[in-house]
Image: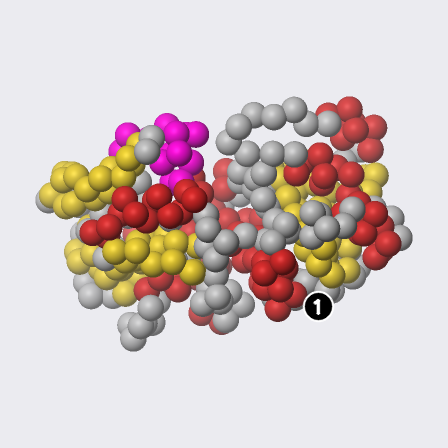
Amino acid sequence: METEGIFLSHGLAKKVRIELGGLGRDEVLIETKACGICMGDIYVYEGKLPGGRVMGHEGVGIVAEVGEDVENVKTGDVVTTLGGPAFAEHYKTKSRNVAKIPSNVEDYALWISEPLACVVNGIRGASIEIGDDVCLIGCGYMGLLLLQAMPKNYINNLIALDIRDERLELARDFGAEHVLNPQKVDPVKGVKEIIGGGVDIVIEASGAYGTLNLATDLVKPGGKLVIFGRHVIDEKVPTEKWHIMGLKVLNTAPSFSSNFNKDFHDAVNLLRKGVFNQKRLITHRFSFEDSETAFKEASKKPPDYIKGVIIF
C-alpha cells in the first residue's frame, strides 16, 4: 500500500508518497497517531547526519492489519512501538516491537516509548550500586527521563547539572537532591563540596561539545563515566586522564544493550506503572500537515522546548 510520510534531509522536511509493500508474516501495520521527534531526526534536518528518507522511530498508533503469524496484538489495538518509519500516516514494524497500551488513551504523545527503552538500557548499563554518588550532566528530555528511572531510594547523593535553571527545577521535582548551573558556579568545586571528592558515576546526557571533559573532572579514580548523550561531531577526549584514573568508560547507546527489545517492553511496563511520566516533558505538538514548522522549531530549541511530537 501507499502512504504519506515526511521526507527528511538537510534543511528539508516535506511530505511525500511512499510505498510500504506487502505485510510480512510477523509484521504489524500501524495507523499512526503520534511520533516523537528524536535528536537524531533533528541532526538529519540540520545536516549533521545523513538523511534523504522518511524517518521516525517513536511511533504510537492503532493496529490496522496484522501478519499471519502475529499473536500478541490484533486489529484495533492501541499500541506503542519501536521502529518505523513512523513519520508517516501508516508504517510497518515487527510484531516483537509492538506493545499494547490502554485502549482509552486520550493523549497518544505521552505513550511514545522508544526513548524510554534507551533510558532503561542506560540505567542497566550504569549498574548503579547501593551508596553510589551519581551526577547527571544534562537535564533535557532524555536526562529528565533518566532521573525518573534512577533507583533514588539507594543512591547516596544524586546531583544534576544543566545550564538552564528551569530544567534544574524539573530535575529537583524528579528526585535530584542537588542541582548546579555550570554557568553560575564551578561545577567541579560545587560537586566536591557536596560529596567531599569525586563521583562514583557520572552520566553524560547532554551530547554537548566539551561535556566529556567535564565528566572526566567530576568522576573519581576508578569510577564510571557513562556516555549516554549522542556526540555526532567527533571531538578530542582526555584518553590519558581516562587511563591514569582507571575509569570505566561506557557507551550506553542502544547497540550497547544485550536485548534492546526487552528494554523496550520493560520501559512500557514502567510507563504503565507511572515510573515514567512525560506530561511535563512533551512541550510541543505539531500537526503532520505542518511538518516543516515542527523541524524548524525543534532545531531552534526555544527556551520552553523540551520534546516535540508530530500528531497525526
Q: Quadrant of residue 224?
A: top right
Q: Report whether 83 appears left or right of 222.
A: left
Q: Report whether 268 appears left or right of 153.
A: left
x and y, in percent, of residue 172 in the image = 65, 65
- Display coloring: secondary structure
User: How many residues crowd around disc 1 within 10 Å: few (fewer than 14), some, or many (20 or more)?
Assistant: few
The vertical placement of 272 against 47, above or below, is below
Residue under numbered circle 1: 153
Residue 18 lies in the magenta stretch: no
Quadrant (top left, top right, bottom left, bottom right) of the C terminus: bottom left
The vertical placement of 16 against 27, above or below, is above
Camera-side residue of 231 and 272: 231
x and y, in percent, of residue 150 in the image = 63, 60
Camera-side residue of 296 and 222: 296
Q: Is residue 83 visible?
A: no
Camera-side residue of 24 and 245: 245
